[in-house]
Amino acid sequence: MKLSGVGVWDGWLRYGDPQEVAQAAAELESLGYSALWIPDTGGPVFDAVRNLLAATNEIVVATGILNLWMHEPAAAAAAHAELTSTYGQRFLMGIGVSHAPIVDKAEAGRYQKPLAATAAFLDGIDQAQPPVPQESRVLAALGPKMLELARRRTAGVHPYLVTPEHTRIAREALGEGPLVLPEQTVVLAGSRPEAREIGTGWIKGYFQLPNYTNNLLRLGFSQDDIDTVSDRVFDALIAWGDESAIRTRIAEHRAAGADHVTVQVLTAEGVADPREQWRRLAPALV
């Protein structure tokens, strides 16, 4: 599976009303977006994938990510086989180890040895009948060890909450060939205060998760940047402004080695359905 262009990453496509989501998916395909990415934080994720595939004709549907602690490898492989048999090679299984505060909330102490757990999950989907082909799966990889595992055993990586500099690091780690498919969060806003009003609370939630803060420290940000959500770290993680500013950030990821960038649009509080923003962005991005 070769992905290019710009995709859409959105939780509403996963948890919104299925009929409304299906209508939005068809529109996103007609607008020229090349993939639809959905999270997995509980519930029947493969039903959501099926809903998106059924509503579209050619667009790729991807999990960003399939939480490996929530699925048995054999069952995930069987779902992949059924969906690809019905809808063709359009389902990309993004797999991730999630985060200790999330996993341990359901079962204290379960989140241990994330690299080994990821390798074991890959072993399981390799041994399933039929297996999930290597070219149909990517990993949510941030650090060097997970990037190396992705290089050896998957089609590439889907890093979340990253900068173009991380995209460059991922490309260097994977070499030519494997896919680098970063997520980029964006805010359509006319000023910094407006962008911060929409994005600061959102980003603070992710700063409670050590995987992301450790990655930022590796990239050269300070603990103070993280604790205060400095303008420096805010601007690095969230592309804000008009359509041109967001297009520029996508171009930076491409220049750093990204094959495909998936855009997550943040909106004002209480607005779950960002179709208006997707429509605005499409002429600039696709």
Image (cartoon, helix red, strand yellow):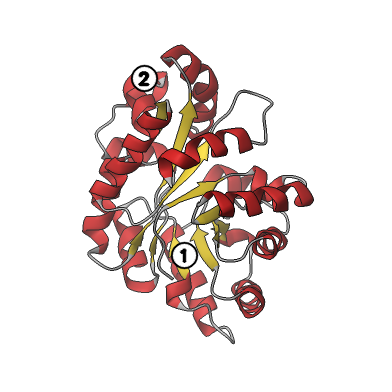
Camera-side mark, 1 or 2:
2
Q: Are marks 1 and 2 in contact (CB under 8 Å)?
A: no
| Disc assigned to residue 230 | 2
- Regarding residue 108, the answer to whether it shows in the image is no
Q: Give the amino acid at mark 2.
A: Ser
Q: Give the amino acid at mark 1.
A: Thr
Spatial separation of the CA atoms under disc 1 and disc 2: 33 Å
Estimate the x, y position of residue 53 in percent, counting from the top left: 65, 64
Near mark 2 (Cα within 10 A), the count class, few <14, some 14-19 or many ≥20, is some
Q: Quadrant of residue 279?
A: top right
Residue visible at 23% across and 65% down in the picture: 176
* In the displayed structure image, the side of residue 237 where residue 201 appears, left or right: right
Residue visible at 50% across and 33% down in the picture: 208
| Residue 19 sits above or below residue 139 on the image | above
- Regarding residue 282, the answer to whether it shows in the image is yes
**Residue at far bottom of view:** 129
Sequence-wise first label, 1 or 2: 1
Q: Nearer the viewer, residue 181 or 218?
A: 181
Residue pointed to by mark 1: 118
